[in-house]
Amino acid sequence: MAQVHPSAVVHKDCQLADGVTIGPNCVIAAGVSIGAGSVLDANVVIEKGVTIGKKNRFFANCVIGCQPQVLDMSLDAEIGGLVIGDDNIIHEQVTIHPSMHPGKLTQIGNRNLLMIGVHIGHDCILEDDIVMSNYSQLSGHCKIETGVWLSGMVLLHQFVTVGKWCYAAGLAGINHDVPPFLVVSGHYPPTIRGVNKRGLIRAGLSEQQQQRIFEAYEKLYRQGGTLLENAKALAQQDGLDENVRAMIDTITKSSEHQFGRYLEKFRK
């Protein structure tokens, strides 16, 4: 059974699985579901309708599922939901907002590490094995793919996609899509600096796969010409593996929007 501290306020309509621990002064609203083995330290707030998977750890003073920060949204506005997967570590003062749209979701995957002060805006999607360092901030509608590592105080504009196994250096301000496997730094505009070698290793890619990514990077970013022209030329080559194809696809899709943010196409 769940262990609930006497000072915690837990709504009667919550679902707490076996092994859940609710610490002092936590507040859990109606309709929340928390999976087995999850632990909430002191002063954690989980708002209504949030679904949390197994073995998640929430450190003190997290606020999860409160109303999105949307100008002129009334306090009684109907909003969407928030779903969090398994084995996530969510440190102090992290805030995660649900979707601003009824019937839609903000989604957090599995095995992610969110350090102190991270903010996840409404309608974001985080896949798996992501690291977000202290005070990194995601605006609404962003997508962070598997294995991304955001260093301290990285900021993302709305609707930005960061491709799998990328690394963003500290203080980066990212306002356009970033293809997979790359290192990005700086702001407005951010600059691609190279290939994220450590990310390739974390991804478990073979030496041959890694070499193909390095070769693709040279053809895309170091041989002159525009990035889109280079991507189209590379796409015509035979025998491209799936990782190089993913890099090309991101460049092609982001070019469909004037500011290089593919997800802007779906803005309502």
Image (cartoon, rainbow, N blue to C red):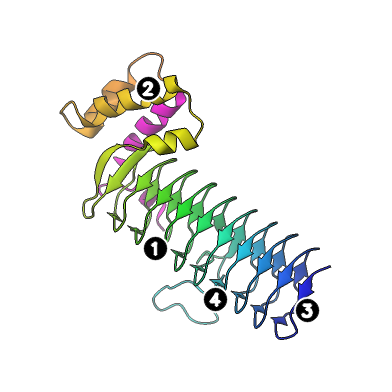
Residue at which label 3 appears: 12
- In primary-sequence order, the first of circles 2 and 3 is 3
- In primary-sequence order, the first of circles 4 and 3 is 3
Q: Residue 61 — which label?
A: 4
Q: Residue 212 — which label?
A: 2
Q: Residues within 10 Å of mark 2 (few under 14, many from 20)?
A: some
Question: Which residue is most to the right?
Answer: 1
Mark 4 or 3: in front is 4
Q: Residue 58 — which label?
A: none
Q: Is residue 260 left or right of residue 60?
A: left
Q: Is residue 195 visible?
A: yes
Image location of residue 125, percent across then percent down: 50, 53
Comparing 116 with 180, the one in front is 116
Mark 1 or 3: in front is 1
Q: Quadrant of residue 181?
A: top left
Image location of residue 99, percent across then percent down: 52, 64
Q: Looking at the image, do the residues carrying marks 2 and 3 touch, with CB atoms under 8 Å apart?
A: no
Give the amino acid type for the residue marked by disc 3 in the picture.
Answer: Lys
Mark 2 or 3: in front is 2
Where does the magenta region start and end? 241-268
Q: Is residue 1 left or right of residue 140?
A: right
Q: Residue at x 29, y 58 (%)?
A: 171
- In primary-sequence order, the first of circles 2 and 1 is 1
Comparing 17 with 247, the one in front is 17
